[in-house]
């Protein structure tokens, strides 16, 4: 579990309690607590604890079968030195990220097969760090947070959908899914994970930047007539881009809005990053979709406007940090 924060530690603890050989890579006070006490999970499904090996040095672990990436996508390009000691000939890299992944057009039949998305993979830096042939996608439907060092609060959801870029159901995906299910998690292997990516992105692309710009929760954004209408327009434009690159997620804007509203007074991860003075993960959520719109000829005026103001805010955060 490379980047064993809230999600990585939760998944690692779940796998470990089912008998998998798990290694957590973390740092700081969180790492110290993981070494001393292991992972303590507090969950409405029942509390539990596990004590897998924890370190800040991947070289101490050596080659493994699966590397699960638990950190933000904006750190992927610099991950090469951490990933390299963990690889053997068949090691899988499972990227649990929001937004458009660097492997999106890898082995995707159609006119864009092999196209590199610059905003996600600038200059090919992510591909060099995380080779495409090792990539497996993962869409996370679980919500967790670090309550204190070594203590993970599981809020809701246990589903981690995974899938191959080439849309096959592979042995390596099935192997990982079986281990996840043994640990009490849901891990469907999807033939077309890109549909899941776009369905989740419909929420992230709207609520994440708007929450940072307004400091509002998801329910607060939904209650306000103006921002609710803005979210709907952003979702409609996102679906247009998905269709233009050959993906057709089967969900309506109203259904996606209703699902987000049920989340309640939840602060998005982007708003939490802003409040902590951290750079926001916007390239894979917003900029990449605008880039895909340019590639496929889709009109996305609302997404362009929000991208501009959110990017300026992100520049200010980076300058102040």
Image: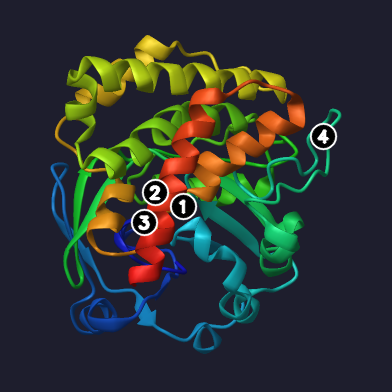
Q: Which residue is mark 3?
A: 11
Cα–Cα gap, marks 2 and 1? 5 Å
- Give the mark toward the camera: 3 or 1: 3
Return the disc, 2 or 3, that comes first in the chain's sequence. Answer: 3
User: Mark 3 or mark 4: which is in front?
Assistant: 4
Q: Residue at x 27, y 74 (%)?
A: 51
Query: Is 251 situated left or right of 142 in this image?
Result: right
Which residue bears the numbered disc 1?
A: 179
Q: Which x, y percent locates residue 170? A: 69, 43
Q: Of tags 2 and 3, which is closer to the observer?
A: 3
Q: Provide residue 241's location: percent of width, then percent of height.
A: 63, 24
Marks 2 & 1, CB-CB < 8 Å contact? yes
- Residue 161 visible in the snapshot: no
Q: Which residue position holds label 4? A: 112
Q: Residues within 10 Å of mark 3 (few under 14, many from 20)?
A: many
Give the quarter of the figure containing the N terminus: bottom left
The residue where tag 2 is placed is 182
User: Gap in Å between the C-alphas at discs 3 and 4?
Assistant: 34 Å
């Amino acid at each position: 579990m490379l980047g064993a924060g809230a999600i990585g530690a939760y998944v690692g603890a779940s796998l470990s309690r089912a008998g998998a050989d798990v290694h957590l890579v973390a740092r700081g006070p969180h790492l110290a607590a993981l070494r001393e006490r292991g992972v303590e999970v507090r969950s409405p499904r029942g509390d539990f604890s596990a004590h897998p090996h924890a370190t800040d040095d991947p070289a101490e672990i050596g080659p493994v079968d699966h590397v699960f990436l638990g950190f933000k996508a904006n750190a992927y390009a610099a991950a090469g030195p951490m990933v390299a000691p963990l690889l053997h000939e068949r090691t899988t890299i499972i990227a649990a990220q929001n937004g458009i992944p660097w492997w999106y057009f890898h082995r995707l039949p159609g006119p864009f097969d092999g196209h590199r998305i610059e905003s996600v993979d600038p200059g090919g830096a992510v591909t060099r760090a995380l080779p495409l042939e090792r990539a497996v996608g993962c869409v996370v439907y679980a919500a967790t947070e670090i309550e204190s060092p070594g203590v993970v609060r599981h809020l809701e959801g246990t589903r981690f959908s995974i899938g191959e870029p080439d849309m096959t159901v592979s042995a390596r995906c099935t192997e990982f899914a079986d281990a996840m299910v043994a640990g009490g998690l849901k891990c469907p292997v999807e033939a077309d994970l890109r549909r899941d990516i776009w369905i989740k992105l419909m929420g992230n692309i709207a609520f994440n930047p708007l929450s940072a710009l307004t400091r509002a929760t998801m329910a607060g954004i939904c209650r306000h007539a103006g921002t609710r209408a803005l979210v709907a327009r952003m979702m409609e434009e996102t679906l247009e881009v998905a269709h233009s690159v050959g993906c057709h997620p089967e969900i309506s804007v109203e259904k996606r809005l209703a699902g987000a509203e049920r989340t309640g007074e939840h602060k998005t991860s982007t708003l939490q990053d802003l409040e902590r003075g951290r750079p926001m993960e916007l390239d894979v959520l917003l900029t990449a979709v605008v880039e895909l719109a340019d590639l496929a000829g889709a009109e996305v005026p609302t997404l362009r406007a929000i991208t501009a103001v959110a990017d300026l805010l992100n520049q200010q955060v980076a300058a102040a940090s």
